[in-house]
Amino acid sequence: MLTAFRWLIRLVTGALVLGLLVLLLAYYILTRSLIDYSEDFTVQGISAPVEIVRNNDNVPHIFGATDADVYFALGFAHAQDRLWQMTMLRRTVQGRLSESFGPATVKVDELMRRLDLYGLALQSVEVQDAETLAALKAYSAGVNAWINQINAGARGRGAPEFFLFSSEIAAWAPADSIAILKLMALQLTGSLQTEVLRARTSLLLSPERLADILPDDPGQGVAALPDYASLVPGVSPSAQPLDFALGPLSPVAGLGLTGASNSWAARPGRSAAGGSLLANDPHLGLTAPTIWYLARLELQSGGVIGGTIPGVPAVLVGRSERLGWALTTAYVDDQDVLIEELNPENSGEYRTPDGWAAFESRQSIITVKDAAPVTLNLRWSRNGPILPGTHYELASITPPGHVAAVSWTALSGADTSMTAALRLMRAGDIPAALEAGRLVVAPAQNLMLADLDGIAMQVVGAMPARDPAHPSQGRLPVLGADPAAGFRGVLPYEVNPRFVNPTSGLLGNTNNKTVNRPFPEHVSFDWGDTQRIQRWLALMQAREVHTRESFIEAQLDTVNPTARALLPLIGADLWFTGEAAAEGTPERFRQRALGLLAEWNGEMNEHLPEPLIAEAWMRALMDRLIRDELGAMADSFTHISPVFIERVYRNVGGAGVWCDVIQSAAVESCTDVARIALDEALLRLREKYGDNIESWRWGDAHEATHDHPVLGDVPFLRHFVNIRQSTSGGDDTLMRGVTRGTGDEPFQNVHSAGYRGVYDFADPDSSVFISATGQSGHPLSRHYDDLGELWRRGEYIPMSLDPDLARAAAAGVMVLSPAE
């Protein structure tokens, strides 16, 4: 017995030692891909030595003899820190994810093949100007130089993820960078999803009630919209919820999760220090690492610093010595869905105004890991690529014998957006920057500018030209054979809205409506914000002059204007109900919650219970108001609509009828619905967070989900690769943190400012910036998440273009020397 016990001890000890050795070996192998930022390299493709000076936050400051050498070094630095992310972006836009991930990503690959963004990027290489083409080639050479270092030495395959998936890394090419910009355009547009949602909802509601649930931006004059059934006959109404998800790694945003951002600027006369001010925080889906990579480039035209995207050789948001530039999503209605009628005698033809025409078609094969390849027949009509009914829920709005095509401004093989981005970095003032914006095709953005003397905002990107007689004005899918349907090219750049040096001295955009022009020069009928802009106006008007600190304060503001406006309205008859209810009763708990809300100023602070109560209440209220009429389709409305709730509770156009439950004999009042929704919300919160209402924390529900796109759901590994943080803010605060809106954790922060920058041209080197995670994509690097805690706390790091300061603060200096 003793001998058996001894052998058991030996076996257990041996197993533990063996396990420890395996872990140590794995750790050793994985750390081989960590970067030594002081290592020097001899490379081919540069004309003279290049310095990459990295500070303690791993922000590279790149100094070279020529612009081409600087772009080479940026590609080298991007590849060192984010090679896996870059290859994933490229695989996504090429439609080649399934080669590594199997059947789970076939739908994503199919969409990308049908849109052919990569093929259009290949065509677009030829239309770049000479400087841009040289930059793209130099950048690609820099990326490939690092890939060669990986292949030549024991560098852990370049990133830990390559051990789990395909380690084959193709050489980088100029088209890859252009394609990533096109992929960003897909992520930032939501016009297609909105058209499908409006079409489906119009089949269930009267025109009056459709105007309630999908309201026009207040103040927008719109002609009566025809119902979808009159535009496209033969579609059956359905209450099934819409699901735009394509599975893992999908670049298609869900409803309410398309691009957003904030930016604002002040002229020198509105600045306490006498210099222009500019603030910007672009909002995108949160990932680990973030999509943004901070960098400084010393070009022949001067230094530029700010946010880059790995794979793209440009500072897309940032500043030079004389100019700052910022971006927000413009919400241009840049997509249309066209329903094409198939020839019943020949499915390879579709109806046009001039009769039947043949589709352009070709075959494409998707290679699928551990499964048979998938062969696609790619078809294009005169209106654009044909998408299958399995994507964007198009089957639910397409009658039998028809297919859906999509027109989209990004589907251009003459896309000069990359040239525009590089010219913007070299622009020294607002006029030059505005001229550079002329070349942007997609994504459409509000370009906010500040130079030493003034400020401006320009909508850049192609705006579709539509026939004034367009049957739906681009708001609903229409029959492709209608002579008035489809795009008529794009509008002249001069039509794009422009604002230069307003008399107020201030400019700002929170994705709000920018112009009130009639169709077809309207920009959009759907905007990304009706709430944040009100808070911004209040903060800007509260001061005669502004400072860097007041701009930072606005950028980090967490007061919710929606809650401040709606809670007194929906709870008007609930705040005071006579005597206090008995302890332990639901009524008493409701009174406690209302008591907290009555004293609350609307601040969405992570440590408070009031934001959680308010958000849960409004979410439950929204669901109760619409589920009776929409059934399961109510699940498609994942976020509250402040304008809808206000219309209901002010009974605008008879919208108060939403409060009455059709199936019940009694007539419910809006007060009844508000009370029931609050009780329901409190019940769910008690089940999850306990009975002590004062101990509830908004931050426990509103965690920022910086999740690894590939490994984030893998047991055990997810604890090492995901970054989760308690955060303040919400859907409608200036410090925006958009909630998931679905599932068991509907309040998780999934879409936020991955980059923040504030630039002061009275003292440019006092400018600051921050990104949401860290510079490295390696989970074992200290730079994987070192900026994340600063970001969460609303802190920043300096943004200096002084070479001496960069070298003095160097934590690592890497020298690239040309091979003989």
Image (tube, rainbow, N blue to C red):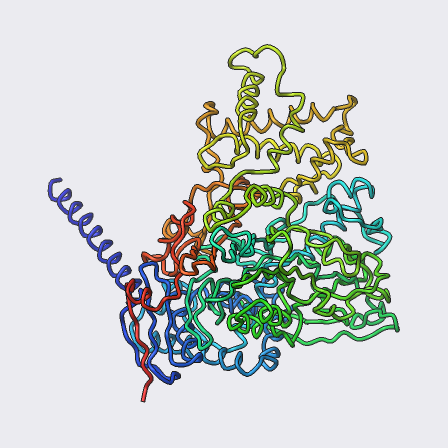
In the rendered image of this protein, does residue 324 appear above or below residue 756?
A: below
- Residue at the spot x=53%, y=25% of the render? 599
Q: Quadrant of the N terminus?
A: top left
Name the residue furthest bottom: 820
Q: Position of residue 183 (x, y in %)?
A: 57, 65
- Quarter of the rendering containing residue 619: top right
Name the residue furthest left: 2
In the rendered image of this protein, does residue 627 appear above or below residue 717?
A: above
Q: Position of residue 816 (x, y in %)?
A: 32, 78
Query: Which residue occupies the foreground of this view, 273 or 351?
Result: 273
In the rendered image of this protein, does residue 18 appear above or below residue 211?
A: below
- Residue at the spot x=33%, y=80% of the render? 49
Query: Which residue occupies the foreground of this view, 246 or 738?
Result: 738
Query: Which residue occupies the foreground of this view, 203 or 671?
Result: 671
Q: Position of residue 249 (x, y in %)?
A: 53, 58
Left or right, 788 with respect to 329, comes to left
Query: Which residue occupies the foreground of this view, 428 or 29?
Result: 428
All told, the count of numbered labels is: 0
Name the residue furthest right: 354
Q: Quadrant of the C terminus?
A: bottom left
Q: Is residue 302 visible?
A: yes
Q: Is residue 168 visible?
A: no
Q: Position of residue 735 (x, y in %)?
A: 51, 45
